[in-house]
Image (spheres, grey):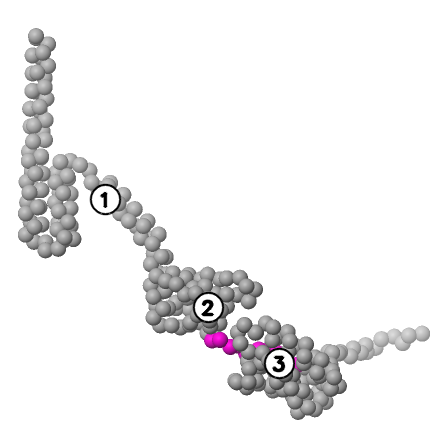
Amino acid sequence: MDEQLTTINHVKTTALDLAMRFGPKLLTALVILLVGIAVSRSIARGLDRSLLSMALFVVLALQNLGVELLPLIAGLSVAGAGIALATQGVLSNLVAGLTIIFTKPFRVGEYISIVGEEGVVENVSLFSTTLGHIDRSRIVIPNRKIVGEILHNFGKIRQLDVSVQVAQDTDLESAMRVIAGVLEANPRVLKEPAPVVAAVTLGDWSVTIGVRPWVAVGDYAAATGELNAALLAALRARGIVMPVPQREVRLIGAAAAP
């Protein structure tokens, strides 16, 4: 019986001690919460503002009870910064994608060159742009890498850059007629814009004729090979010389051979 009374007295003493230590703080916390609810309902008109106001008073109430919130807030801040850094690239791509879609610096099917890559635009999404390369591979470029960079948009046709070297004593008009005939015979060469054929360089031993016809983007590689082969055959058939570089070396003061 005495042990039970001792236990009851101990519980009462402990309860009174806890009430004396935490009672005022708990009462103050409850008052803060009640005031916070009243203020939030009376001041905040929207749900977001109400929640924000309530959160502020909850923090004050917990702080009054002795709960250490600074480490928690610091941890949340670090986590928020990490999330912000992680989503920065995604958001940048999204904004850049919207910019590309609305400003239309290029369209699907056009041939472009940008950030050291080039190819036919196959797809433009909110986050990336896909190019089809000449080797049938695909290049996926994040949109944030495109906006703000120098863009070369070829459109849907490209101009070949072929050169032919002939001897200096060649009749250039005849040579150009031969070249024009080769261009006209190739079905990949476009009639409009008209091909450009002109003497571009006068060398020590030859004249360089530039041959620059226009072709569709998809015919660029094939047309280059076809024209090089056809020009070589046509010029040889007409007897037009395509000279090989030569150098004459003289030794002065060398001993005569016996």
Residue at 6% across, 24% down: 16
Separation of residues labelled 2 and 3 (CA atoms): 27 Å
Residue 76 sits in which quadrant?
top left
Q: Is residue 214 visible?
A: yes
Q: Amino acid at mark 3?
A: Asn
Locate the N terminus by quadrant. top left
Q: Outermost residue, top direction?
A: 1
Residue at 7% across, 16% down: 9
Q: Secondary structure at mark 2?
A: strand
Q: Amino acid at mark 2?
A: Val
| Secondary structure mainly formed by the magenta segment | strand
- How crowded pointer 1 is (Cα within 10 Å; few <14, some 14-19, many 20+) is rated as few
Q: Nearer the viewer, residue 108 or 207?
A: 108
Q: Which residues are magenta?
A: 155-164
Residue placed under numbered mark 1 in the picture: 73
Residue placed under numbered mark 3 in the picture: 186
Q: Residue 137 shows which numbered tag?
A: none
Q: Residue 82 location in percent, x, y?
A: 32, 49
